[in-house]
Amino acid sequence: MKAHEIFIEGEPSKRKIFNMNGYTIVDHQKIENHITFFRINPTDIKLTLKDIFNSISNIAWISSFDEEYTRNGFQVRANATINYISENIIRENDDMVTSDSGECIVSELARKTVVTQMDYLDIPLGELIKIKEIGNHGFDFFSKNKEDILLFGEAKYVAAQNAYGKTFKQIVRFEKDEKKDCSDIIDIDKFCNEESKRNHANGHKGFIAAFSAKSTTTDKLIEGIKGNTDYQTLTKFNELICVAVNL
């Protein structure tokens, strides 16, 4: 479904609004040349949840692989995740955000926004392509920019406050202490070209921080983001995308 583009008149940035299926991208701007900010507003939670479930359930991407063993392997992983989500996270006719569905909403809306608005590589949600591990299984979603830089996405939902601090902190921990981006390369290997994997091996990489946001104005939100020490650590990488989801 194509977005319907609207320009906000009278603002020097000429920020764009994109109306999507069940949600609206209400802000898209550059914080720095290599740092992008999006803000998303779900307009109809029931429709948003349905659209997200449909998006996750669409496993047509599996047919793009030539080898039967690859198709079969991803089919098993994806089916297990889709069944789990339908039974435990997003059920038919859900019309409320829960602690379980919140992070799923933030992850998938951020992933879709990066793919549709920046024309970056569409890699399925991490839940669909990974083998589950004990403890935290690593980054939530992935993409690749037009300079063949791999982007590792992490999403957080907190009901009572803006969640950007938790998201930035986890990304820094994943990258610095646990090297989760290095281990996740194995899972996304078949979706990435050789140049992007060589770039990553040489330390060239980026991150997507997706987080729930409250009624804080965008200017105040960005001010808080820029003052966060973990955010400042992440600015040294090739690209950083921040996606705020109003939940």
Image (spheres, rainbow, N blue to C red):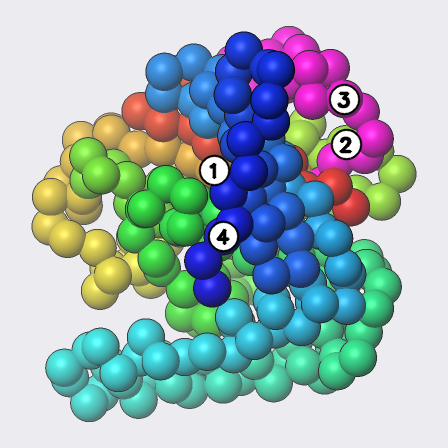
Q: x%, y% of residue 219?
A: 69, 15
In this view, the mark in front (3 or 1): 3
The label nearer to you, 3 versus 4, is 4
Q: Circle 4: is it few (<14), some (14-19), or many (20+) Cα within 10 Å?
A: some
What number is the disc on residue 217? 3
Q: Which residue was labeled with disc 2?
A: 162
Q: Nearer the viewer, residue 66 or 113?
A: 113
Residue 117: x and y, percent? 42, 43
**CB atoms at circles 3 and 4 under 8 Å apart?**
no
Q: Position of residue 58 (x, y in %)?
A: 46, 78
Q: Which amino acid type is marked by label 2?
A: Asn
Question: Residue 186's image quarter?
Answer: bottom left
Q: Residues within 10 Å of mark 3 (few under 14, many from 20)?
A: few
Classify 10 Å Cα crowding around label 1: few (below 14), some (14-19), many (20 and above). Answer: many
Measure the C-alpha gap from mark 3 to mark 4. 24 Å
Residue that label 1 marks:
208
Q: Are marks 1 and 2 in contact (CB under 8 Å)?
A: no
Residue 205 in view in this figure: yes
In the rendered image, the residue lying farthest to the front is 9
Residue stretch rendered in magenta on the structure? 212-234
Indicate whether 47 appears above or below 223. below
Q: Amino acid at mark 1?
A: Ile
Query: Residue under circle 4?
Result: 3
Residue 194 belongs to magenta span: no
Tell me how far mark 3 sits from mark 2, CA to CA.
Answer: 11 Å
Principal secondary structure, stretch drawn in magenta: helix
Q: Earlier in the sequence, mark 4 or mark 1?
A: 4
